[in-house]
Image (cartoon, helix red, strand yellow):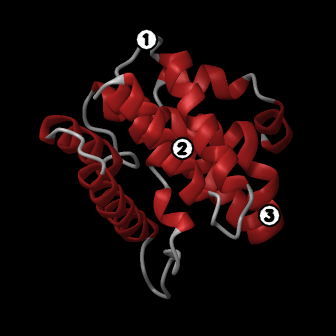
């Protein structure tokens, strides 16, 4: 992937996520990308694109939601798969080479669970972004009990490095009991 392709994909992703009914989704996409760059400066363009696109399905109706009697982990798997499928089509349509496409799709598929260095960085950046900018909007939509549960889940999956960043954020301090 070259710089021109990166810039085109970045614009496509941000435009697509802007279709979400939740304003925070676009900010979360950009924030996750920025956190990836803070955690792993000078990282490759594939990880950067995956960071921007990890939640792209939120801008494509119908948005995935947790189903009744579905575990949160199963919901997150569906969400990751749908985002990866949407992004794969975009990558192919834009002539991105197969190796880069596979890497981006794999990172998006694994952004909730990690599994290798880059997927772990993406998972951490996703979590840090939630603590950095996502909590107020989530609280407003889901209420205090679900927000506390999500805080616990997001924090538990983080590396020690990510936890150190999160502990310094005002939103973490506000919800720490």
Q: Give the image location of residue 36, x and y in percent.
A: 50, 26
Q: Residue at label 2?
A: 11
* Res 177 seen here: no
- Crowding near the residue tagged with mark 2, few <14, some 14–19, many ≥20 C-alpha atoms within 10 Å: few
- Above or below — where is 106 with respect to 79? above
**Closer mark to the observer between disc 1 and disc 3:** 1
Q: Is residue 60 left or right of residue 129?
A: left
> How far separated are the C-alphas under marks 2 and 1?
20 Å
Q: Nearer the viewer, residue 143 or 21?
A: 21
Q: Residue furthest left?
A: 98
Give me the residue at 77% from left, 69% from top. Answer: 141
Label 2: element kind: helix
Question: Number of numbered discs present?
Answer: 3
Give coordinates of residue 48: x percent, y percent.
Answer: 43, 31
Reading the image, the residue beneath label 1 is: 42
Q: Nearer the viewer, mark 2 or mark 3?
A: 2
Q: Nearer the viewer, residue 62 or 164?
A: 62
Horizontal and vertical percent for residue 28?
Answer: 64, 45
Q: At numbered mark 1, what does the secondary structure look like: helix, strand or loop?
A: loop
Residue 129 appears in the rendering: yes
Residue 123: x, y in percent? 44, 38
Q: Nearer the viewer, residue 20 or 177?
A: 20
Between the residue at mark 2 and the residue at mark 3, the CA separation in whole angstroms equals 34 Å
Q: Nearer the viewer, residue 29 or 7?
A: 7
**Image point 70% across, 26% down: which residue?**
167
The local secondary structure at tag 3 comes to helix
Determine which residue is flagged by label 3.
144
Q: Quadrant of the C terminus?
A: top right
């Amino acid at each position: 992937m070259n710089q021109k392709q990166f810039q085109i994909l970045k614009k496509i992703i941000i435009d697509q996520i802007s279709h979400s009914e939740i304003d925070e989704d676009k900010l979360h996409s950009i924030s996750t990308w920025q956190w990836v760059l803070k955690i792993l400066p000078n990282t490759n363009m594939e990880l950067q694109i995956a960071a921007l696109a990890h939640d792209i399905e939120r801008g494509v109706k119908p948005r995935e939601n947790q189903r009744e009697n579905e575990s949160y982990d199963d919901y997150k798997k569906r969400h990751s798969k749908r985002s990866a499928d949407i992004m794969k089509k975009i990558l192919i349509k834009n002539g991105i080479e197969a190796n880069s496409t596979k890497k981006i799709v794999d990172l998006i598929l694994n952004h909730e669970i990690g599994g290798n260095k880059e997927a772990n960085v993406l998972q951490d950046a996703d979590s840090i972004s939630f603590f950095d900018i996502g909590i107020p909007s989530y609280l407003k939509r889901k209420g205090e009990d679900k927000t506390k549960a999500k805080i616990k889940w997001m924090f538990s999956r983080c590396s020690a490095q990510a936890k150190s960043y999160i502990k310094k954020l005002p939103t973490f301090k506000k919800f720490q009991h």
